[in-house]
Image: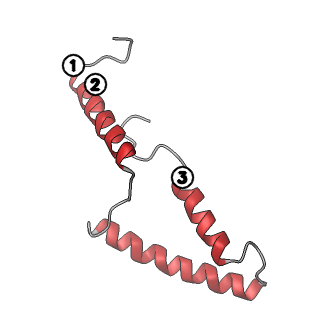
Amino acid sequence: MFWQPVRTNNDVEGFHCRLNEKASHGQLNLYKLVQLLHAEALLVNVNLRLLSEGHALHLQRKSFAALHSRLTKYWGEYAEGTRSAGPD
């Protein structure tokens, strides 16, 4: 996952969990489900605009932020040729 900041599907899992909570764990009729999905689609557009304008960031735990920082450093070193892909 060279230079890929998101390496898991946790964002998708979180979205699914939130949607499941809002949908009363599948106990919605079709019309309510369509309304819920439409409201979620509107939120996606708003979040996308905020992210593209730099007003919102992906939330990350400190431990994962530190890990990502180290990975970014190592990726940079690899790209510069100062770090190899093999064992040290």
Q: Which residue is mark 1?
A: 82
Q: Which residue is mark 3?
A: 10
| Quarter holding residue 34 | bottom right
CA distance for labels 2 and 3: 27 Å
| Quarter holding residue 73 | top left
Pick the quarter of the image with the N terminus: top left
CB-based contact (under 8 Å), mark 2 and mark 1? yes
Residue 59: x and y in percent read 38, 59
Q: Is residue 69 above or below residue 20?
A: above
CA distance for labels 2 and 1: 6 Å
Q: Which residue is mark 2?
A: 78
Residue at (78% x, 84% y) in the render: 29
Residue 44: x and y in percent read 47, 73
- Name the colour scheme: secondary structure
Classify mark 2: helix, strand or loop: helix
Q: Amino acid at mark 1?
A: Thr
Residue 67: x and y in percent read 36, 38
Q: Residues within 10 Å of mark 3 (few under 14, many from 20)?
A: few
Q: Amino acid at mark 3?
A: Asn
Label for residue 20? Answer: none
Q: Is residue 33 above or below residue 80?
A: below
Q: Amino acid at mark 2?
A: Tyr
Q: Residues within 10 Å of mark 2 (few under 14, many from 20)?
A: some
